[in-house]
Image (cartoon, rainbow, N blue to C red):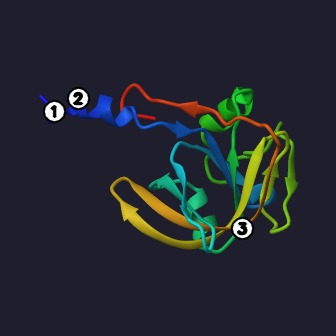
Amino acid sequence: MGTEKTTIGRALGQIPGGVFIVTAGKGEKGTGFLASWVQQAAFEPPLVSIAVKQGRPIQSLIESGEPFAVHVLGKDQKKIAAHFAKGFAPGEAAFEGVGVRTGVTGAPILDGVNTYLECRFYGKTAAGDHVIYLAEVVAGAAVEGSEPEVRVRRDGFTY
């Protein structure tokens, strides 16, 4: 009963998660993706973990030491989530139609998001069909009183 894939999928789906956008690069090399699994991983230094599906174009930017940003989306930010949910091929203009500025580390920061963390690559480990990146948070900001989007999936085997 508890070992069937559908039962396991329903149980995994009950782990609550946020809605995040991870961005890296500049200009033509700038890209981003909608991330489901981001979590604080340490206090000192301040680290977050980010699960990235194997083959995402952003991986080479993160691993090269390029600064990148994790944006925590709020309940009212479904439009920007939809923009990044479609995914972008290498070289495709990921920031077209989206306001973006350069953060203190050089990472692309999306306009209008409630919270962002500017990060640097710290380490990685293989995790099945994903890679778990550890990232040191070196800058960031949050809008006072902002409330992050929290979601629960119906099936733990799909986003």
Viewer can see residue 157: no
Image position of 97 with respect to 49: above or below: above
Viewer can see residue 81: yes
Number of numbered callouts drawn: 3
Circle 3 sits in a helix, a strand or a loop, which is it? loop
- Residue in view at x 70 percent, y 48 percent: 71
Circle 1 sits in a helix, a strand or a loop, which is it? loop
Image position of 58 with respect to 148: above or below: below
Quick check: 77 left or right of 57? right
Q: Identity of the amino acid at label 1? A: Gly
* Mark 2 or mark 3, earlier in chain: 2
Q: Identity of the amino acid at label 3? A: Pro
Q: How crowded is mark 1: few (under 14 residues within 10 Å), some or many (20 or more)?
A: few
Task: Indicate the quadrant where residue 114 lies.
Answer: top right
- Seen from the viewer's position, the closer of residues 143 and 122 is 143
- Residue in view at x 79 percent, y 60 percent: 26
Label at residue 67: 3
Q: Distance between the residues labelled 1 and 3?
A: 42 Å
Spot occupied by residue 53 in the image (x, y as percentages of width and height): 46, 51
What residue does disc 2 label? 7
Quick check: 51 left or right of 71? left
Label at residue 105: none
Circle 2 sits in a helix, a strand or a loop, which is it? helix
Q: How far apart are marks 2 and 1 (CA)?
A: 6 Å
- Residue in view at x 36 percent, y 29 percent: 155
Quick check: 68 left or right of 50? right
What residue does disc 1 label? 2
Q: Identity of the amino acid at label 2? A: Thr
Q: How far apart are marks 2 and 3 (CA)?
A: 39 Å
Dots 2, 1 in contact, CB < 8 A: yes
Quarter of the figure with the N terminus: top left
Q: How crowded is mark 2: few (under 14 residues within 10 Å), some or many (20 or more)?
A: some
